[in-house]
Structure formats: structure tokens, C-alpha cells
Image (tube, helix red, strand yellow):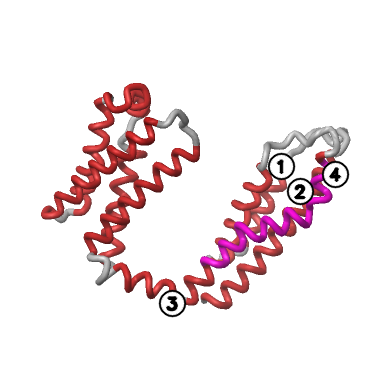
Amino acid sequence: MMATQILLQLLLAHILTDFVFQPTAWVLQKREKRAKSFYLYIHSILAGLLTYILLQQWHLWYIALFITLTHFGIDLWKLSSTKDNLRIFLLDQLFHIVIILIAWIYIMDGSDEILPFLERSFSSSAFLAISIGYLIAIFPVGFLIGKATQRWHNELKSGSGNGSLEAAGRYIGIFERILVLTFILTNNFSAIGFLIAAKSILRFSDKSEAGARKQTEYVLIGTLMSFAITIIIGILVRQIAF
């Protein structure tokens, strides 16, 4: 319990620093002035200060200093990039999470607390079944549905164009399967019906346009396949994990 509490405290300090107590004006000035930005230093100090306050272990001042220095370095790296896109954002957050995990392992003396926790997790049938279930629902099932509906996809592409966003269907399918699997594992089967109803409000181009019906049928086939396969996976995972 203590290990979980400390990890949550470290994560909360990071979330407060990066997303709650960082006004847009700070972000804009940091992008403009980079290492010369006064707010970059304030932001980094705030990361360490919040960590120190939330941990409430006053002898661990060096952990707060470690968070401050690494937060500064990671943010400076992000600001040095000429791009500010999703990839940079995710890498930035990943680096922060890695630093938090390093601090957590050090505080808990990893050999005594963390390693046994990881050993228990990877020896748990429930943990393994749930992890595998999500991985299968996100990756192999998407590949399978893509192959199964390829001929209809090609038929739509050969037409005048379907007006949809590039790769939008793939990402919609991933989030759809994550939601369905989560609903099943949390015993909220009725929520699946709401998800189906929500998707039914989608409106395509005017039905008088050529290919509109084909596009609707194509999406419907993919949706039903996605739901059916994910429900089967969810039921199997429940049998193993619960």
C-alpha cells in the first residue's frame, strides 16, 4: 500500500505541475524564449516543490531536487524541437514518467518492494489475461478486421472518394474495442448498447450520393465484427481472470 501511495503522490505532483498549474501564457513564453524563459525555471521548481510537499517525507529533499533538474532538462529538450506535435508530447510525458518511476524505485528500495510486486503481477493469471485481452483487442483484431473488409475498402476507394479522415476508422475501432472490453470486464454489459446507439448517430454524406449506401454498409460490417470479436475476447478473459 505504501508503494502505491508514493507512486500516486509522485504522479499527482507531475499532473498538477504540467496540466493544472501551468497557464497558457507560461507555455507560450517558454516556446518563444526557451532556456531564457523565466517561466521555465519557475515551472521546474514547482515540479520539485509539489513533489516535496505531497511526499511529506522531509528528509527526501534530494528527490525533489532530482525532479526539478530532470523536469527542466526534459522540458528544455521539448522546447528545442522544431515541432510541437503529438509525438513530441507523448515522448515528453514518457520521459517524465520514466523519471518518476526511477524516483519511486529509489524511494521504495526496489529490491525489497518493487521487484516482488512485479513478480506477483506477472505470476497472476488475472493480470496476464487482462493485459493479453487488451493487446489482442487493440492490435490483432484491428488487423483481422482490416483484412476481412479489404475488398469493400478498395471498392470505396475506387469510387469518387468517401470524404473520411485518413486512418480515422482505425483509431475509432481501437477506442471502440477498448471501451467494449472495459465494459465487459467491469460487468457493464448494458453500456455496450449505449455505445452502439451513440455510433448509430453518425451521419454520412447525402444518401443520394453514389456510394453512400456502400460506405454505410462497410462501416456497419466493420463495427459488428469489432463488437462481436471483442465481446468474445472479453468473455474469455472474464472466465480466466475472475
Regarding mark 4 in the picture, which secondary structure is present there? helix
Q: Amino acid at mark 2?
A: Val
In the image, residue 46 above or below residue 236: above
Mark 1 surroundings within 10 Å by alpha-carbon count, few (fewer than 14), some (14 through 19), many (20 or more): few
**Residue name at image x 27 percent, y 66 percent:** 110
How far separated are the C-alphas under marks 3 and 2?
40 Å
Q: Earlier in the sequence, mark 2 or mark 4?
A: 4
Between disc 3 and disc 2, the foreground one is: 3
Regarding mark 3 in the picture, which secondary structure is present there? loop
Residue 216, quarter of the rendered image? top right
In the image, residue 25 above or below residue 117: above
Q: Which residue is mark 1?
A: 202
Mark 2 surroundings within 10 Å by alpha-carbon count, few (fewer than 14), some (14 through 19), many (20 or more): some
**Residue name at image x 65 percent, y 60 percent:** 140
Q: Which residue is mark 3?
A: 123
Q: Which residue is mark 2?
A: 219
Residue 132, quarter of the rendered image? bottom right
Q: Which residue is mark 4?
A: 155
How far separated are the C-alphas under marks 2 and 4?
13 Å
Q: Earlier in the sequence, mark 3 or mark 2?
A: 3
Q: Residue furthest left?
A: 59
How far separated are the C-alphas under marks 1 and 4?
21 Å
Q: Amino acid at mark 4?
A: Glu
Asked if the residue under mark 2 is in contact with the one under mark 1, i.e. CB atoms within 8 Å, the reply is yes
**Residue name at image x 30 percent, y 58 percent:** 7
What stretch of residues is rendered in magenta? 131-156
Regarding mark 1 in the picture, which secondary structure is present there? loop
Image quarter in which the N terminus is found: bottom left
Q: Earlier in the sequence, mark 1 or mark 2?
A: 1
